């Protein structure tokens, strides 16, 4: 989320991170964000029909190349979180202020990864 | 849409094949057959009734029972695999300590983490694009290399890690083309897992140097769109790393 917020600032956007983590109405400010969030949910979830529909929506809106990239990003983070969580690695120092700011904005008190010692 | 007709970038296609090959090959602490057994158990975890009950419970630590394991691996290893695969966001240091107290070595544990992450990445990508679950490859013969970095120390994580600046000349380099940021350092007790997993990860997501280069785009999706997906998937896994 640190990079997401930073990328928005480069483009002069302030994305709604509450909606990114699922606590809002779904409008994030990212182009085609709703479709990409639905695809992410479907990839991690277990409903094959929902995933079929989400795939078609991504391809129709963004094309096949973007669809492969979306699948790659989902696969990357569905695996890398397990490394962070299973080793108890903390967030890098250079990211901690930005991460803390995001957690404060979202009303989350603790990192769920690497600070649960 | 037929997933088999999709064009997969060359770097991603190569990284996927290398990862399948690496899964089946002797590792640093586990043999090829053991690595494939760990990968198979990782897949079984997603259909385990105990894991499902724990996932739905307010605390996973209040639900006892036996995992739906394949019988190839000891119970302590099955517990580690299933918990990391199905509920990693609620792992705690006390659980990790218990895993090591059960007889699992720290090096063996870290290699298991690398195998789980690799098979989870490969399977999630295939599911995402609509490919069926790929059969696990046949294990390759040979012995693990059993090299522990001499300079690995407990400074940062639950496990010993190898700082770039501490690495001894004879230590294998876990960061051949990676910045030693924390998530790369996490598995540096087993350098081959860092290099192997992040070859796949950079192809799935973005090359290291591209992640914070917000002025340029490297994929058909923008940084913001990629990070949106990344953030949502991490949040669904209860990880705000």
Image (tube, coloured by chain):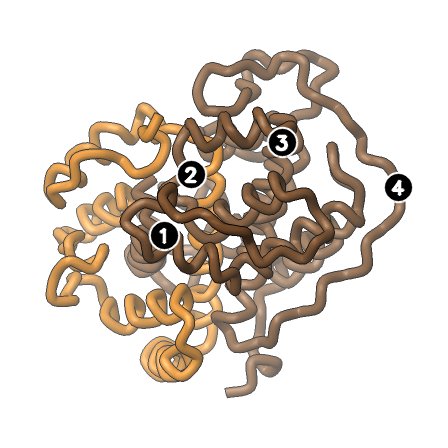
Indicate the chain coloured brown by its letter.
B
Q: CA distance from mark 4 to mark 3?
A: 25 Å
Q: Is residue B234 above or below residue A117?
A: below
Residue pictured at 36% horizontal, 31% vertical: A114
| Label disc, if present, on residue B142 of the rendered structure | 4
Is the Cβ of the residue at disc 1 closer than 8 Å to that at disc 2? yes
Indicate the chain coloured orange by its letter.
A
Is the Cβ of the residue at disc 4 closer than 8 Å to that at disc 1? no
Q: Position of residue B218 (x, y in %)?
A: 43, 56
Which residue carries the number 3 mark? B176
For label 3, the SS is: loop
Q: Are marks 1 and 2 on the same chain?
A: no
- Which chain does tag 3 point to? B
Which residue carries the number 1 mark? B237
For label 2, the SS is: helix
Which residue carries the number 2 mark? A85
Is the Cβ of the residue at disc 3 closer than 8 Å to that at disc 2? no
* Front residue of this view, candidates B187 and B216: B187
């Amino acid at each position: 989320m640190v990079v997401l917020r930073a990328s928005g600032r480069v483009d002069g956007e302030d994305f709604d991170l509450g909606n990114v983590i699922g606590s809002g109405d779904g409008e994030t400010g990212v182009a085609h964000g709703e479709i990409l969030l639905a695809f992410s949910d479907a990839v991690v979830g277990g409903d094959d029909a929902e995933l079929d529909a989400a795939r078609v929506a991504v391809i129709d809106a963004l094309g096949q190349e973007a669809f492969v990239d979306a699948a790659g990003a989902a696969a990357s983070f569905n695996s890398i979180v397990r490394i962070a969580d299973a080793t108890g690695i903390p967030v890098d120092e250079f990211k901690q202020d930005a991460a803390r700011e995001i957690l404060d904005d979202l009303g989350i008190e603790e990192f769920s990864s690497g600070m649960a010692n | 849409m037929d997933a088999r007709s999709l064009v997969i970038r060359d770097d991603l296609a190569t990284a996927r094949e290398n990862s399948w090959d690496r899964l089946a090959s002797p590792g640093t602490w586990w043999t090829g057959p053991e690595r494939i057994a760990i990968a198979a158990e990782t897949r079984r975890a997603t259909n385990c009734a105990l894991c499902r009950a724990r996932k739905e419970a307010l605390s996973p630590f209040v639900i006892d029972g036996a995992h739906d394991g394949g019988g190839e691996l000891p119970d302590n290893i099955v517990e580690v695999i299933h918990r990391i695969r199905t509920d990693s966001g609620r792992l705690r240091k006390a659980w990790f300590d218990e895993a090591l107290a059960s007889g699992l070595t720290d090096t063996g544990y870290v290699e298991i983490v690398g195998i789980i992450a690799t098979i989870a990445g490969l399977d999630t990508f295939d599911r995402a694009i609509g490919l069926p679950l790929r059969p696990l490859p046949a294990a390759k013969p040979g012995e693990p290399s059993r090299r522990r970095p001499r300079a690995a120390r407990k400074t940062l994580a639950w496990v010993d890690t190898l700082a770039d600046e501490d690495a001894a000349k004879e230590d294998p380099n876990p960061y051949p083309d990676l910045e030693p940021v924390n998530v790369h350092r996490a598995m540096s007790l087993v350098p081959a897992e860092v290099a192997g997993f992040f070859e796949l990860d950079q192809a799935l997501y973005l090359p290291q140097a591209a992640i914070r280069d917000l002025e340029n785009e490297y994929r058909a999706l923008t940084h913001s769109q990629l990070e949106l997906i990344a953030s949502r998937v991490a949040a669904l896994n209860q990880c705000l790393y």
